[in-house]
Image: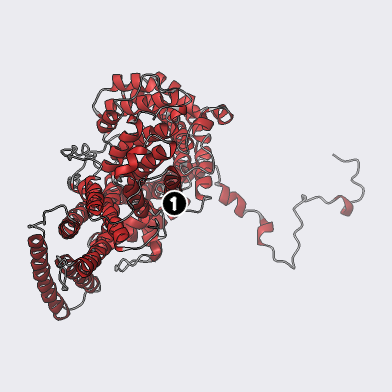
Amino acid sequence: MSRRSRSPARRVVSAGALLVALIPVASVVFAQPPPAAAPAEPAPPATASTPATPDDDAPPKAPPPPAPSAAPRDPTRGDAMRAYHAAMTRRRLGSQQGIRVEQLSERVAEAEQLVSTGRYDDAISRLTETIEHPSFDNVAETEQGRAALYLLGESLASAGIYESARAYLRKSIASKSAWEQRGAYARRAVRRIVEVALETQRYQDGLSDLAGLPPSLPDEVRGEVSYLSGRAKEAAGDPDGALAEYGRVPQTSRFWSQATYLSGLIHVERGRMKQGEDLFCKVADPKRQDSSTPVFADERFFAVRDLARLALGRVAHEQSRFDDSRYYYYLVPRDSDRLAEALYESATSRYEKKDYDGARELLDELRGLKTHHRYEDEAQILDAYVDLALCKFEDADKKLVTFLRTYEPVRDSGRRITASPRAMAALLAAARAGGDPGGADLGASVSREQLRAVAALVRVDPLYVDVAKRRAVLEREASGLTATRGALSDMQKSLATTGGVRPATEEGRDPAESAKAARAALDGVRRAIDDLETARAPADKLAPLREEAKALEARLTRAVAASDAAAADPAAGADLPDLLASDVTKVTAFSAAVERTKGELAAAEDALARDALRRLDLRLSRLLRRARLGRIESVLGRKRALEVEIEAIGAGYLPPDAVDSLDAARYLQDNEEYWPFEGDDWPDEFVGTEGLK
């Protein structure tokens, strides 16, 4: 039988592999409960890039990563695929020949093409079918077998299915020939395990995956393990152990810059400024641009280097070494995402040194960027206070009035957005993704420019980003459940037609589909209610929609209960019809569980989004108070300037504007000519007085 045949047997294997690809998603997401809602008054943590002082908008401290759930019997979840292969072998369906190396090379190349185009689910399906085949053990130790094993782990990790990905990657580094011929795929597997551990912040799990590595490892692999060990010790509250592990990361490792930078942060947090500054200098050195580090490092090297330069500037600023801090801030390149941050902090340091002209120059450069950034509100306040320091009271007052006129509506817009969950989620999604929030349908009476200002000013909590990412992974992977159930139903019908087996599912409305439709209708009604409430519609127009929402909530409750009841009695057996019926039950159970988990993640996302906008409100309120105080200072300054002028006039000194008013030439019109006074005696009009004195 041809490998690309679309026979019923081939469809059975493909659907089974697709279900195997989808099953781990639920276990991964369900094993990680959404973070708790942010507290009403979060304590500001120290950020990773600065030893700076906390302010009103510091994000809430992240809770510790969730504890790993109990490991399943088969972490790869490949037993379902093996059960399909065994059932098909008993029925003599599909190819009875083993996997040949030539076939495996074609399948690996096909999977690599799918991965390169982002079709991870298809790649997982094809590779799972191949690797869990009974004859794969015959080719597992070949180069193509190692490539297939690593590629499946890579595809699962890229799709967010971390538990199964780790299981296959562990197999990739534990095989007999994994480290032969320089162990190319084993090295890549180690790198991917480290990346998964860093991304999920489950450092101990990553270290346990790497526990069986041979002692004779290349330097770059040892550097990966040392860096992960350092992150684990730092997360466990052991800074000395973290420093020791970071010190073992060689300069040829891609994590050398991160390890050195984090070591500097540990020293600075413990008050050892000199040691921290020395470590920051190693990363921030401009001469390192042309040395070997960027060659061995990854794309994050330049971002870490900019952070190190900011850290140097902040350390110098903290020690009142303002000239040094300006030099360090100057090292941040113009194409850096941290340029606005560097310019603002450099201007602040010049202001504290009382170099107001230098602060003005840096603020003008910051304004010349002509883009929204997170420091634009604070930069405008600093700009006005520089004018106050230079006794330019009228200019300062104009800037403060402009600030009040601009940012009071922005703060009020943020408060209106907070009242609408849909508007809040859309705005923060645009702010997080870097898109244009002015094009978002927020359902709130705010202008597009105000929306852009809110999106630029809001500090998106890393916890919010993590929850939103997990929700996106869940929705992406769960979107295949409906198609999988349809494929399983088609195959059940095919088997019933050709083999006399009664299909386990009948035509009719799927409880999971009913729940999904009810939830979509309920969301639409709630959006309509939000829009009408924003527009301040009368109560008689809102009452029918609220009644409809109650009816949809009851319908949704019934649909979820029916879905749970359908999943309560799974089928048992090892034949193809039994396996298909069992998978249909699993799909139904997963659909209901996915909807519940999406609700939990949405609640956590909403709480974190509200906290982000609350912190924005606190910061803008603080800056608006400073602007009003600045206006008072400008009035007092002008009053004092008038008092000084009056005192000068009393002492016989005319003010500059009064002296200028005596200049007659300034009053002439275009057709007039002014002859300056040359004295009472004109030599050309008096004769005979040449000898007189």
Query: How many numbered marks does the figure carry?
Result: 1
Q: In front: 636, or 313?
A: 313
Q: Which residue is mark 1?
A: 110
Left or right, residue 678 beside residue 571: right
Which residue sits at x=30%, y=19%? 240
> Is residue 623 something one can see in this rendering?
no
Which residue is at the far bottom?
540
Which residue sits at x=27%, y=25%? 233
Left or right, residue 381 beside residue 649: left
Which residue sits at x=36%, y=55%? 122
The picture places residue 149, in percent across and down from the top left corner, at 36, 40
Snapshot quadrant of residue 228: top left
Left or right, residue 416 beside residue 400: left
The picture places residue 589, in percent across and down from the top left corner, at 15, 57
User: Helix, strand or loop at disc 1?
Assistant: helix
Q: Is residue 65 above or below residue 86?
A: above
The picture places residue 689, in percent across and down from the top left corner, at 89, 45
Q: Is residue 227 above or below residue 97?
A: above
- Image quadrant holding the C terminus, namely top right
The picture places residue 241, in percent across and down from the top left corner, at 29, 20
Q: Residues within 10 Å of mark 1 (few under 14, many from 20)?
A: some
Task: Indicate the amino acid at tag 1.
Answer: Glu
Q: In front: 195, or 281?
A: 195
Which residue sits at x=26%, y=61%? 484
